[in-house]
Image (tube, rainbow, N blue to C red):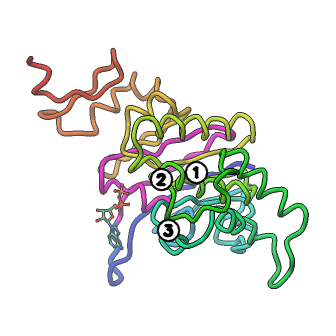
Amino acid sequence: MPLEFRNLIIGYRDKSKLKEIAGPFDIEIPEKKLIAVIGKNGSGKTTLIKTIGQQLASLKGGVYLNEQSLLNISNNQRARLISFVYTTTLSSENMTVHELVALGRYPFLHWFSKPSKKDTDSIKEALTFTALDVLAKTKIHELSDGQKQRAFIARALAQETPYMVLDEPMSHLDHHHKAQLFSLMKKLVTEKNKTIVYTTHDIENAINHADYILALNEGESFFNTPKKLIEKGVFNRLFPKDRVYFDSTTNRFLYLDSKSK
Ligand code: ADP
């Protein structure tokens, strides 16, 4: 069930004028892999996520799942295929972790119907997988950023979709919690067969942990494995050359001032 970007140009319509942000993309997202979308601020990462989520219409081309344009798939059908994890969802602050995760079952519930055994099992499993069972009764606003992030992932997990799309899941997390989140995402790929697309401006971590990277840079885009992108010198194109350079021996970005020392 491949997810594809076909001739996709993303951007905005400002009073009938088209403002292209990135593309055209012609990419088949490899299944059961961890895919990072990287680029500096303003490069179009969120615009791409909004386009996949159909909150924003593409300027050209489209997003296809299983040969079908997402435009022709109902919201409910889509919610059974792709789940989204956004960091800034404040409306859920007063819920318990369990209530939030239970929301992941909404594509499967009918109004006023009682949750089935399958629903309760999925919620329980999502809580266990993300090690949140002990916090099930805790309110979202009482959680640390790392726990909160896991709770949103658990909600997406309860949704049982083959694809998961996460917008900036690493922001606000310290190194320890980033490492924990990477290991969770990798476990989701290897043990639950998920295909995960996440956005980040933490390029070094993406190089070290993602299977594939989609790099956005001022209208250009590059999609490949981190190794191939390094070989092609892509990471040296992302920032002004007089300030930052990519050191391919250590896979790190260095500031030019530090190079001379
Ligand atoms: P990123 O997530 O990589 O930081 P965004 O996708 O948020 O980048 O933004 C990409 C570009 O689109 C930026 O130049 C931004 O100013 C522009 N942009 C964002 N939202 C809108 C909008 N609603 N209308 C027009 N332009 C927008």
Q: In the image, what residue type sits under mark 1?
A: Arg
Q: CA distance from mark 3 to mark 1?
A: 13 Å
Query: Which tag, 3 or 1, sits closer to the chain's start?
Result: 3
Can you identify the residue that label 3 sits on? 89
Horizontal and vertical percent position of residue 44? 38, 57
Q: CA distance from mark 2 to mark 1?
A: 10 Å
Question: In front of the other: label 2 or label 1?
Answer: 2
In-image side of 223 versus 236 (left or right): right
- Ligand 1's image quarter is bottom left
Query: Which tag, 2 or 1, sits closer to the chain's start?
Result: 2
Q: Nearer the viewer, residue 214 or 89?
A: 89
Write down the quadrant of residue 251 in the picture.
Answer: top left
Residue 83's disc is: none
Q: Is residue 33 magenta?
A: yes
Judging from the image, what secondary structure is the residue with disc 1 in?
helix
Can you identify the residue that label 2 sits on? 144
Please state the extent of the stretch shown in magenta in the rendering: 20-49
In-image side of 55 versus 248 (left or right): right
Q: Is residue 205 magenta?
A: no
Q: Nearer the viewer, residue 5 or 207?
A: 207
Q: Nearer the viewer, residue 64 or 261?
A: 261
Q: Answer yes or no: do the residues labelled 3 and 1 have beta carbons within 8 Å? A: no
In-image side of 213 versus 108 (left or right): left
Can you identify the residue that label 1 sits on? 150
**What is the crowding at mark 2: few (fewer than 14 residues within 10 Å), some, or many (at least 20)?**
few
Name the residue: 61% across, 44% down.
Answer: 29
What is the number of callouts on the image?
Answer: 3
